[in-house]
Amino acid sequence: MEPPPLTEQTVTYQLSRKEAVRFLFFHSLRRGRMIRSAVVLLAVAAFCFYLGSGSRSLGFACVLFVLLFPLFYYRNVGRLIDKNPALTARRTLTFGPVGIMTSRCGTNTRMTWTGFKSFTENATYFVLRHSGYQMESILPKAAFTPQQQEEFRRYGEAINARGMEV
């Protein structure tokens, strides 16, 4: 794989409230701790149903909690987004051979490419997973020109390959 060009590119984007809520909601629900908790509660419910009529109400409560929790959690993620306008603020992303710099609300954040664990993409977004902690950066592809998308994709593929110095 040949290294990406040695130029810096700049894109500006802003996530909508809906995009931010959906991303944070699904990202956190996919985490192992949430899934394990739901499985444990369902196992408790099954055990309560097995024990008989005296503990069935606890079993129903566990099942009801597992079913309703996502609805309440989605609402709370929306409140979190509303209380933190920086999460949906307009951002400027500059990327190049050294790494990325993000500017929003008067705050600049710099990170080298080695600070990312992985890179993925779907039809709408590029996703960078940070090393060391469970956090992801989502970047809407619509903010990139086709040439910028290709260059950013090469940097992302280098993160996944880790065989290339970036």
Image (cartoon, helix red, strand yellow):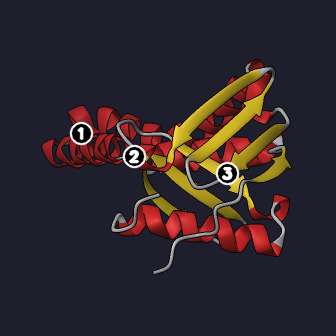
Circle 2 crowding by C-alpha within 10 Å: few under 14, some 14–19, many from 20: few
Dot 1 or dot 2: first in sequence order is 2
**Label 3–label 2 contact, CB within 8 A:** no
User: Which label sits in the foreground, 1 or 3?
Assistant: 3
Residue at screen point 73% across, 46% down: 94
- Residue type, mark 1 in image: Ser
SS class, disc 1: helix
Camera-nearest residue between 11 and 26: 11
Q: Which residue is mark 2?
A: 31
User: Which label sits in the foreground, 1 or 2?
Assistant: 2
Dot 1 or dot 3: first in sequence order is 1
Circle 3 crowding by C-alpha within 10 Å: few under 14, some 14–19, many from 20: many
- Residue type, mark 2 in image: Arg
Where the N terminus falls, by quadrant?
Answer: bottom left
Dot 3 or dot 2: first in sequence order is 2
Q: Position of residue 102 (x, y in %)?
A: 70, 37
Q: Which residue is mark 1?
A: 53
| Vertical placement of residue 6 versus 113, above or below | below
Q: Report if residue 55 is visible in the image.
A: yes
Q: Position of residue 127 (x, y in %)?
A: 58, 57
Q: Position of residue 36 (x, y in %)?
A: 28, 45
- Residue type, mark 3 in image: Phe
SS class, disc 2: loop
Q: Which residue is mark 3?
A: 95
**Label 1–label 3 contact, CB within 8 A:** no
Tell me how far mark 3 sits from mark 2, CA to CA: 28 Å
Q: Residue furthest front?
A: 6
